[in-house]
Image (cartoon, rainbow, N blue to C red):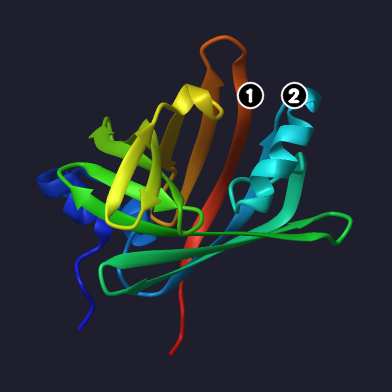
Amino acid sequence: MTSQPLMQRALGNDWEQLPRALQAHYQAESNVDVGILSIEYPPLMQPYLFVLKLTGALIDRAGTASEARVHKSMSGARQYWRREIRFADGELVRFNSEWEHTGGNQLIEYVNPLFGLRMSVKVEGGRLLYEGVHIVFQLGPWRLPIPEWLVLGHTTIVEQAHDDDSFSMDFRLCHPWFGQVYRYAGRFKTQAVEG
């Protein structure tokens, strides 16, 4: 028996306000999102993003992917996301993470065993809105908070359904001094995974 979706736990009764396409995107059953993803950032960010990529955080290539696939599956209390982004020249970039519900309307997305991003979620006007709370440094049983601006900037994500089958997402990092330093956005359809 499949457990309740993590996003449903975080949203509580507001889960019912999510359009069908977004409920399918966050379902507990294994699934894959298929679509197109665009990534943009200022050229001065390239060296910093190269270092972050070594830790498993973000993608250090700008441009529009010819195909993006996000494989999701649940195991215990965590959801695992395996992203595959293929660019027009054939380069395949992978970005994996683990999601955990931490109580209330908050989730942590871990990009490696030590670092994650704590975010709050809410539904407004049928859209799912994420707000970064802080970076998490996991040290044994302790979770030490690190202000977002010390790493890249404040995180926001907006997800919106276009119909019963497709949705778009828009992820942005905005630094208080430097403005928007990273963005990726795309449109996807969620498909079931056989077996």
Residue for badge 2: 42
The quarter of the image holding the C terminus is bottom left
> In percent of the image, x 70 and y 32: which residue is there?
40
Q: Secondary structure under badge 1?
A: strand
In-image side of 194 versus 26 (left or right): right
Q: Residue at x 31, y 46 (%)?
A: 143
Q: Amino acid at mark 2?
A: Pro
Mark 1 lies on residue: 181
Residue toward you, 92 or 64: 92
Displayed quadrant of residue 82: bottom right
Q: Is residue 53 left or right of residue 29?
A: right
Name, please, the residue furthest toward the bottom: 195
User: Where residue 147 appears, x then y in whole percent?
Assistant: 41, 26
Q: Are marks 1 and 2 in contact (CB under 8 Å)?
A: yes
Q: Name the element at disc 2.
A: loop
Residue pushed farthest right? 89
Q: Quadrant of residue 118?
A: top left
Picture layout, residue 102 above or below residue 155: below
Residue drawn at the location 49% of the way across and 22% of the way down:
149
